Amino acid sequence: MPTSPRNEPDGTLGRETTSDPVEPGFAASDDPSARRLQQLAHVTALLAAADSIDAVVDAVTNRVPDAIGAAVATLMLVDGDQLVLVGASGVQEGIEERFAAWGIADHNPASEAVRDGSPVILSADSDIEARYPVLAGTVPAGRSLVCLPLNEGKSRLGALGLTFEQGWTPGAIELDFLTTFADVCAQSVRRIRATLASEERAFYLSFLSDASIELASSLDYRQTLSRVAQLAVPAIADWCAVSILGDDELDTVAVAHIDPEKVAWAWELQARYPTNIDDPTGAPAVVRSGVSEIHRQITDEHLIAGARDAEHLRLARELDVRSAMIVPLRARGRALGAITMLRTVSGRPYEATDLAVAEDLGRRAGVAIDNARLHSLSEDVSRQLQRAVLPGQLQAIEGCEIATYYNAGGTAEVGGDFYDAIALEDGRMAVFIGDVMGHGLAAAASMAQMRAAIRAYVVTDPTPQVVVTKLDNMAARYAMNQLVTLVYGLVDLERGEFELVNAGHYPPLLVSSDGTTHFAQTTPEPPIGTRDVTRTSSIWMLNHGDTVLLYTDGLVERRDEVIDVGLDRLLVAAHVMGSEMLGAGLAEMLAQLDDKTGDDDVTALAFRIA
């Protein structure tokens, strides 16, 4: 290792010496050197108890100089392939900015000490500036320089730099003590970093858990990603933007900023300078390649290179961005978009651990987006199927007034409600309403199958027992898994006779012309598909002006409420259909029964013999 020609064993810590003969490196208890050794031992004890990097910096830069009589003390820590200055005392103005960071491969005392793992000692007699030109003009004449590596096992965590007046250099004992102090400093840094890393891991695990809950809470991916961006700020970013790949463009769907007032400004910036899908770096490049980007230090040169015009550069500088990560939103082996996370000048630069968390978030968000899109596709197919099957407007039937209503449930999924009214050649009318339990494509497909089968069976024999029995046989033969309830009836418009079978459905409601309401008394029977059941029908006699209401469960069922309450509510509300025009009466009744919190389909079919 480089040594000083004055590195003799009779050196003493500091500038003061004693004339009494003493053991090399030590002195009597009243000797200043001994006192300084004691002070350094005290600082070492404080250092061993330090619980933060700031406490280590304080011990090195504020306490060590007084303890050993150093004019200057600096502490640099390894950060990647650099040595970063984290604290200094006694340095000239402007030196901290000048030596804020050195490359470990650079030619300077601190980097050399870290590379070799050995102290670098330069006495006043050494030609310091000739050996290290980078120090030109920074070490006053007559001073010596000592750089000690922070060794922790085989790891080099940084360097402790000390400058002494009057050219003092440590002897063997003093050097051993200083080396021990540097080792304790390294151990403290390692311990504190390990504690911080553990706390950071726990924090990130909690963050990812919260994000997963948000991602699973809704199938509206735009709303969900907006919430994820808000979670990321300020947890792991000062600014977060989420972009989704559309038709040859990246659409920003969420923006969050630590300053709420800047969110609108960020949206405006995005609108004025939209992302170019062909950009060689940033979100477009990440989406194309599926490979994340991390920019630990964003300099003004980077901003200049990425600016589209002078105004864009000015706005970019106002952001004070100093570090960035861009990760893909991935699902099934492809990138669906990207998450951009930025830290301003106030935050620490992003590291590999941050990137790993961001990539995990990107994977979870990508799967959520993919699931939402698949759900939307299934929902769209279901809606198309439902629109194709449900009658848009029922055929006009002579001698009968008909009104219908259908509204999909609040779950945003297509349900299995179905209905129809069919005029027969002999002047009668077949009418039915049913409900396939569940939502989505399976329910819509079963609904379509049921309605098509009923229409086919009606052609050969519209008798209620016959039609419903055939539906039972079809469901059993083809192993239909969905539960289906149904009211099917045959109306003789001339005689006013209504014959019906109720297969596990809510009973029809009769509204007399005077507004009197009551439910049909029908034989309770199981839903469609039940084996070994003999269907029986009930017959109602209807007067001119009487209204029959068929409906599904969404009209009467409420959460945390017994069904009798809902049926009684319907009995009261339905009286308005007695004297009104049928369509107007049905609309008024439905307005009274509207449940904005409901999540089931609401379907109603009303008919009145004219």
Image (cartoon, grey):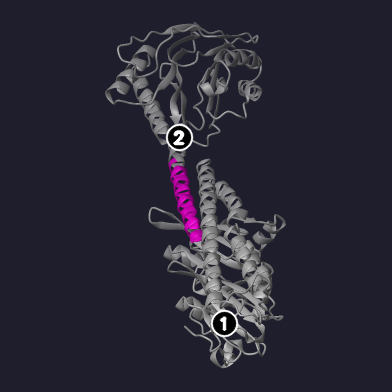
Q: Position of residue 470 (x, y in %)?
A: 32, 18
Q: Quadrant of the C terminus?
A: top right
Q: Position of residue 241 (x, y in %)?
A: 58, 58
Q: Is residue 468 left or right of residue 79?
A: left
Residue sitting at the far front = 21
Label 2 packing within 10 angstroms: few (<14), some (14-19), many (20+): many
Viewer-side residue, 319 vs 537: 319
Viewer-side residue, 86 vs 14: 14
Q: Amino acid at mark 2?
A: Gln
Q: Position of residue 505 (x, y in %)?
A: 46, 16
Residue holding disc 1: 10
Q: Position of residue 20 (x, y in %)?
A: 64, 80
Tell me, yes or no, if residue 270 can be seen here.
no
- Specify which label sits upstream in the sequence, 2 or 1: 1
Residue holding disc 2: 386
Residue 390 - label: none
Q: Is residue 15 left or right of residue 84?
A: right
The residue at the point 37 percent across, 20 percent down is: 458
Identify the main secondary structure in magenta: helix
The residue at the point 66 percent across, 16 percent down is: 576
The question of residue 566 being in magenta is answered with: no
Q: Tell me the element at label 2.
A: helix
Q: Is residue 288 left or right of residue 46?
A: left
Magenta residue span: 353-378
Q: Quadrant of the rendered structure where residue 512 is? A: top right
